Amino acid sequence: MSTSTYAASGTDQPLNSTARVATASFIGTAIEFYDFYVYATAAALVIGPVFFPQGSATAQMLSAFLTFGIAFLARPLGSALFGHFGDRVGRKSTLVASLLLMGICTTLIGVLPGYDQIGAWAPILLCVLRFGQGLGLGGEWGGAALLATENAPKGKRAWFGMFPQLGPSIGFLAANGLFLSLAVLLSDEQFRAWGWRLPFLLSALLVMVGLYVRLKLEETPVFAKAMAQHERLKLPLVELFAQYWRPMLLGAASMVVCYALFYISTVFSLSYGVATLGYSRESFLGMLCFAVLFMALATPISAALSDRFGRKPVLVLGGVLAIASGFAMEPLLTQGSTTSVALFLSIELFLMGFTFAPMGALLPELFPTRVRYTGASAAYNLGGIVGASAAPFAAQKLVSLGGLSWVGGYVSAAALLSVLAVLCLKETRNEDLSLVK
């Protein structure tokens, strides 16, 4: 493969090197998902007592999970906002802006006083910053996926689209690894007083690295060609809902299984494992760090398979296995064996990586260039409302009503929804992204 990609119009103008595309699409999503997972982990461990000290431990946990869900409600708005500018102005500048917003909000959460210091303002400001996190992430993934796929050579879009899909694994590993280190090095009192803030503050340094990489980028060749042919729309969102609402909704439904697998097996399971199963915070975080390696392993495997056999066969296979995995939740988590818990987490996160990897190519392939940023982002983030925003909260309610088997049923139902949506989509492996549809 040559060291540079070239404009799709056939000019000799070199654009982004393969290494630069891979690095920029990967590092941005790794940082953004690090920011997001830092909050998810903190929500399971400490957000409730610090910002919602009144009420029982269960009420605190439910309040923390509600603030967790706020960001998912903001993500579709972020996809509309950043998607508009991404389709109007370009992928590069929009990706820089989304990264900045996410990093600033995450850092500010790290210095936000708790309820004991500023009273009701603490949870209010927390919700505002959490909303900002959601806006930023709403614009991040779509741009990173387009950066990868619009620079990809023929027949390699899923492989290139894998790089932003690896970001969540590394971001999660970094976030939980840091929390694990703090759990080992600090006492519970120190961790609750100030230690939990350190991962949020570290985000500022990571964002500087991400900005440096992204500012070195050139615009993608597919978008540059579209602009040369005057294909820019005044309101991409209007055309998306007018002409491409069906692939947007089916794409969103196909994403639900990814979100449900991930957030049930991490955020809910972490809370349940510590509060109910009796694991220490550091031991359960250690199991999650081990299990997420299987998510990272599944990502390139699934990407390579979807380039060879198509997106639909790989996603249907992963979805069917995910349906079956829901039935394994109660027996594996209630055996009282660390091995069985680690096995369940590893299975769920492997399946998450397996179903998540092809999405980096599939969702951009569903839309023409002029609405691709908006459409891919909208599908990705609308799926999060169904699959993730309420998942930890709903799981907490379901386990109190019917036990873990009901939570497993939630996972299976989410996977069934995604399988049905994928079956309704056309195969997109051979789509030409530079063509107007």
Image: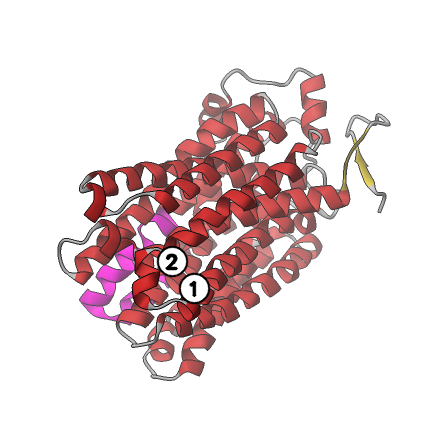
Residue drawn where x is 34% and y is 83% of the image = 335
Instruction: Tell me which corner region of the image, top left, top right, bottom left or bottom right, holds residue 303.
Output: bottom right
| Residue 155 in sight | yes
State which quarter of the image contains the C terminus. Answer: top right
Using the image, tell me which numbered label, if any, was put on residue 195: 2
Residue drawn where x is 18% and y is 54% of the image = 53
Q: Residues within 10 Å of mark 2 (few under 14, many from 20)?
A: some
- Which of these two is toward me, 278 or 321? 278
Q: To which residue does mark 1 refer?
A: 182
> Looking at numbered disc 2 in the image, what kind of residue is underneath it?
Gly
- Residue 435 percent coordinates (x, y): 69, 29
- Residue 387 percent coordinates (x, y): 38, 51
Q: Secondary structure at mark 1?
A: helix
Q: Which residues are magenta?
A: 386-414
| Residue 254 in sight | no
- Residue 130 percent coordinates (x, y): 35, 41
Q: Are the residues flagged by discs 1 and 2 in contact, CB closer than 8 Å?
A: yes
Please determine whether, in this image, residue 33 is positioned above or below residue 415. Answer: above
| Mark 1 vs mark 2, CA separation in Å | 7 Å
Using the image, tell me which numbered label, if any, was put on residue 25: none
- Which of these two is toward me, 136 or 126? 126
> Looking at numbered disc 1 in the image, what kind of residue is underneath it?
Leu
362 drawn magenta: no
Horizontal side of residue 120 vs 320, given as left or right = left
